Amino acid sequence: MAQKTSTKTPAKSAKPATPAKGKAVKAKPAATGPLAKMKALGGKDKLVDQIAGSLAHDGADEGSIKDRLTKASNAQLLRLASVTEAVKKAYGSRDKLVDALIKALGRAKDKDYVAKLGTFSLPKLYDLAKSTERKAKAAKKA
């Protein structure tokens, strides 16, 4: 009879390997994921409180928006925070963004279109404004 040989590897020790004397240990880079960014900004609740007011529009209750935002992922909240910051820097407020869009599109007399723009979310309005600016720049070059 042939004897069976074991193919199991020996158990590894639980101790981490120590560097040799004289060699520097490299520090781990700081975490850059959504959770780490959220913690750096002060936590989810603090960020939700910051952006909820900016996202409220046309009778939307700020409390219900906060409830929905607390259930959103960290990446979504960070994206919304960057959009609200960009709108504040470039336009000042949501109403000024809508006014700038109406003027850029040349639809100031179209009351239905103006009313419809008022119902759009802030990120959608910002994307529309960016694309309108790109089209205007392309038209100037041509």
Image (spheres, rainbow, N blue to C red):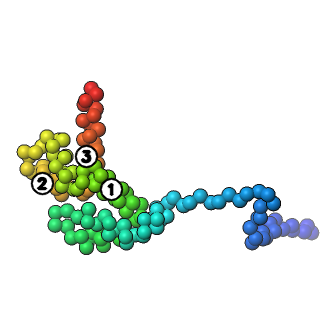
Q: Residue at x 19, y 46 (%)?
A: 101
| Residue 27, picture quadrant | bottom right
Looking at the rendering, in which quadrant would you find the C terminus? top left
Task: Name the mark nearer the viewer: 1 or 3.
Answer: 1
Q: Position of residue 1 (x, y in %)?
A: 92, 69
Answer with mark 1 or mark 3, whichever residue precedes in sequence: 1
Residue occupied by mark 2: 115
Tell me the element at label 1: helix
Query: Type of residue at label 3?
Result: Ala
Answer with mark 3 or mark 2, whichever residue precedes in sequence: 2
Q: Residue at x 21, y 51 (%)?
A: 97
The answer to whether residue 76 of the structure is visible from this angle is: no
| Farthest residue, direction right | 1
Q: Position of residue 20 (x, y in %)?
A: 80, 60
Residue occupied by mark 3: 129
Tell me the element at label 2: helix
Numbered tag placed on residue 85 in the rendering = 1
Task: Name the mark nearer the viewer: 3 or 2.
Answer: 3
Q: Residue at x 25, y 46 (%)?
A: 129
* Above or below: residue 116 compared with residue 41: above
Q: Position of residue 64 (x, y in %)?
A: 25, 72
Query: Type of residue at label 2?
Result: Ala
Answer with mark 1 or mark 2, whichever residue precedes in sequence: 1
* Above or below: residue 100 compared with residue 88: above
Label 3 – label 2 distance at C-alpha: 16 Å
Label 1 – label 2 distance at C-alpha: 24 Å
Disc 1 residue crowd, few under 14, some 14–19, many 20+, Cα 10 Å: some
Disc 3 residue crowd, few under 14, some 14–19, many 20+, Cα 10 Å: many
| Residue 140, picture quadrant | top left
Nearer to us in this view, 106 or 95: 95
Q: Residue at x 34, y 68 (%)?
A: 48
